[in-house]
Image: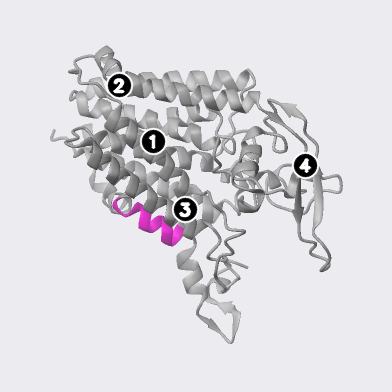
């Protein structure tokens, strides 16, 4: 049977990730069970980001299999990452004020600096530089030769992992404060003090991930509706958003960046894992070899991730813990192998034509749908009052 072109696999994975993102954005508020986990744990929505990063890595393995000029390739990779970074700040920095608010504009002193596209841009750049500069000239004829050719990339992934774990469990987190405006009056903002003074805490209040973002990015540039607002401590409607309980802790209304600096270190590792799966496509042509070499690391990552969770390194998307990276990379690997088996080996491609089209235009669809650009534009056309618009009639944005 004639094999399907290699780009089709990454297009399908892009599309499935995109479909999941749109699904959880639009339905997650109605069905909290598929929305992001309030803190520890794993839901359908928590697979979306790792799947995107994984397939970015696979794509890089195919794109840079032959590099004629490393300097030119590096320059192009940096430019692509900068474009994606700027686009992310524009879309997620606060320029669009969302549904039920037809105003726009960005207060530079308050804009959100990190976000989904920014994280993808950073992970893409790191993985691209590793693929351009950190691979040997060995001829690959076996799995051992594959590891030897890319040994410095695995070393980079290991170093990143050690840095992340060392900082997460080794840095001291002092007591900190934040302010929020008083919605009931025009008086000075309320100040909340979050008592910490600990090391190695991975709860919402005193983790190193949040501390680093507050110190480097500034608390005013962090995401203002974090997932931990849906925990039992912070919402009477948990696992959905809701009013604060009477005994809510001080940290419940604090900003927190889910795509922060330290957590993005492990996002880079996910991208590097995807890069390895792309290398298998490049160097091994036999279907059975590819499936086998994908399933072995996927199984190992799954076992390691679940074991780490059992022994206390909890699966946590907000912190992007090592156990979370392992389990989600494993799921991405199994899914990738499944798509390859279904489409490339058995030839079930006809029913995926629409998905293929969506995958080719993943970024545009993400911008228009997942970033609420289409709903915001539609909402701009109303009858007499802004509330009388098509979205309100069908129950969106109420």
Q: Does the magenta portion include 368?
A: yes
Query: Which mark is drawn over residue 150?
Result: 2
Inter-mark Cα distance, 2 to 1? 15 Å
Residue at 54% in and 36% down:
263
Q: Nearer the viewer, residue 189 or 104?
A: 189
- In the displayed orientation, state which residue is furthest to the right: 246
Q: For the magenta stretch, what is the residue range?
A: 360-369
Quick check: 361 above or below 337?
below
Residue 351 x, y percent position in the rendering? 27, 47
Query: Which mark is drawn over residue 126?
Result: 1
Inter-mark Cα distance, 2 to 4? 46 Å
Label 1 residue SS? helix
- Of the image marks 3 and 4, the number of the one nearer the N terminus: 3
Residue at 60% in and 70% down:
100
- Of the image marks 1 and 3, the number of the one nearer the N terminus: 3
* Of the two numbered discs 2 and 3 in the rendering, the one whose residue sits closer to the viewer: 2
Picture quadrant where residue 374 is located: bottom left
């Amino acid at each position: 049977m004639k094999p399907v072109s290699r780009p089709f696999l990454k297009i399908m994975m892009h599309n499935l990730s995109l479909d999941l993102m749109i699904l959880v954005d639009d339905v997650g508020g109605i069905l909290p069970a598929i929305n992001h986990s309030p803190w520890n744990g794993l839901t359908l929505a928590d697979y979306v980001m790792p799947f995107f990063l994984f397939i970015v890595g696979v794509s890089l393995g195919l794109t840079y299999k032959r590099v004629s000029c490393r300097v030119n390739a590096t320059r192009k990779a940096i430019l692509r990452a900068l474009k994606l970074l700027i686009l992310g700040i524009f879309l997620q920095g606060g320029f669009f004020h969302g549904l039920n608010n037809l105003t726009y504009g960005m207060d530079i002193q308050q804009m959100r600096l990190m976000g989904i596209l920014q994280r993808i841009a950073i992970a893409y750049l790191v993985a691209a530089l590793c693929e351009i500069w950190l691979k040997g000239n060995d001829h690959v004829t076996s799995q051992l030769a594959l590891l030897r050719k890319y040994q410095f990339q695995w070393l980079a992934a290991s170093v990143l992992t050690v840095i992340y774990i060392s900082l997460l469990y080794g840095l001291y987190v002092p007591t900190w404060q934040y302010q929020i405006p008083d919605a009931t009056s025009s008086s000075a903002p309320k100040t909340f003090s979050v008592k910490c003074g600990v090391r190695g805490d991975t709860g919402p209040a005193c983790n190193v991930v949040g501390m680093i973002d507050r110190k480097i990015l500034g608390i005013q540039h962090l995401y203002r509706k974090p997932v931990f607002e849906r925990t039992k401590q912070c919402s009477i409607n948990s696992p959905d958003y809701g009013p604060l309980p009477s005994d809510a802790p001080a940290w419940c209304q604090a900003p927190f960046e889910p795509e922060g600096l330290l957590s993005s270190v492990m996002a880079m590792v996910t991208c590097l894992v995807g890069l390895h799966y792309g290398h298998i496509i490049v160097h091994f042509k036999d279907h059975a070899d590819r499936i086998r070499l994908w399933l072995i690391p996927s199984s190992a990552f799954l076992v390691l991730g679940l074991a780490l969770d059992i022994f206390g390194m909890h699966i946590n998307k907000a912190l992007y813990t090592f156990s979370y990276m392992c389990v989600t990379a494993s799921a991405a690997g199994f899914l990738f192998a499944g798509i390859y088996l279904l489409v490339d080996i058995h030839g079930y491609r006809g029913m995926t034509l629409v998905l293929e089209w969506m995958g080719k235009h993943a970024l545009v669809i993400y911008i228009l749908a997942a970033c609420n650009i289409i709903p915001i534009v539609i909402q701009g056309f109303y009858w007499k009052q802004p509330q009388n618009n098509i979205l309100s009639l069908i129950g969106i944005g109420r």
